[in-house]
Amino acid sequence: MAFDCIVVGGSYSGLAAALQLARARRKVLVIDGGQRRNRFASESHGFLGQDGRAPGAIVSDGRAQLLAYPNVTWIDGQAASAERAGDGFGVATADSTVHRARRLVLATGVVDRLPEVPGLAERWGRSVFHCPYCHGYELGGGEIGVLAISALSMHHALMAPDWGRTTFFLNDAFAPDSEQIAQLERRGVAIERTPVAEIRGEKAEVVLSDGRVFALEGLLTATRVEMASPLAAQLGCAFEETPMGDIVTTDMTKETSVAGVFACGDAARAAGSIALAVGDGTMAGAAAHRSMFMREDNATAA
């Protein structure tokens, strides 16, 4: 095999996985398409030691540190397909070049499908967010909105008051029952049932269909996620359904249902952040390494 492991995806989880393998003196190939999920955000928060830094700067530093290891090869480009090849795997890039390795780590990420509200996509990652832990503090305790997409949005609405006075815009996507209304009232959440017509302004002015305007410091909303890459499905990996969309099923070591294939980061986690992605990647990289020498020992013993 040309490589011990191919890591598909060079963002936070992929970098962390590749670093463990590189430090185990294994020959590693990273294939990265350069599409970070948080590329719309100017700052990252909640990652110890990196709080407030630009997300791209964190990735750039991580890549430079990884490439200091001579046993790491990096390809800027898309991994188009993957398949099992003998006792390992083959990954083809967009130019049809096939790279082979004994193990695969899929750090391929997800694509966010946003609510279809005019003006929302333009403010995604700037004044419209999915994670209050990542962006809530910077709203300064001001007025916050939560835009419902389903019953899942109750979770957002009940969390948000710790970061500011909260209005829950149901937008015909969700109708809380009497118990849920009582929960919202106990948390001081105002409920707005009139549909949202658009979002405008420098921050997040929510304009309702009746013309009323709510000037907010920020708006929280959940998204539906889809796999950013077809590789896991091509390899036959099992998926699990979550309220936000399907993710790749993994065990405690981040190995998928396909032996020798590991998955980490947002593609294999129902909720994500940089800190969680790095932890996932660290586990996946270390587990991929362990699987190589443990299975080597088993084969020798047999």
Image (cartoon, helix red, strand yellow):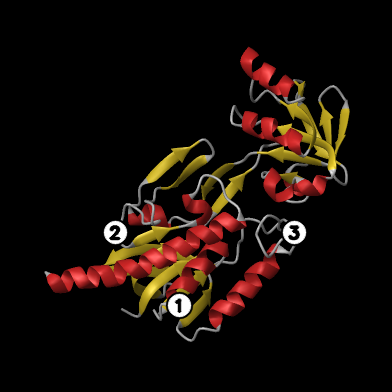
Q: Nearer the viewer, residue 222 or 277?
A: 277
Q: Position of residue 284 (x, y in %)?
A: 43, 62
Q: Residue furthest bottom?
A: 70
Q: Residue furthest top?
A: 178
Q: Position of residue 17 (x, y in %)?
A: 47, 67
Height in image: 136 above or below 99? above
- Residue, x 48% and y 56% (percent of image)? 229
Q: Is residue 87 visible?
A: no
Judge left or right: residue 94 versus residue 297.
right
Query: What amino acid type should be assigned to the residue bearing mark 2?
Result: Ala
- State the SS at label 2: loop
* Residue ID for mark 3: 43
* Residue ID for mark 1: 22
User: Mark 1: few, some, or many residues within 10 Å (few <14, many ≥20)?
Assistant: many
Q: Position of residue 37 (x, y in %)?
A: 62, 56
Query: What amino acid type should be assigned to the residue bearing mark 1?
Result: Ala
- Residue, x 64% and y 13% (percent of image)? 178
User: Mark 2: few, some, or many residues within 10 Å (few <14, many ≥20)?
Assistant: few
Q: Earlier in the sequence, mark 3 or mark 1?
A: 1
User: Mark 3: few, some, or many residues within 10 Å (few <14, many ≥20)?
Assistant: some
- State the SS at label 3: loop
Q: Position of residue 26 (x, y in %)?
A: 39, 79
* Residue ID for mark 2: 259
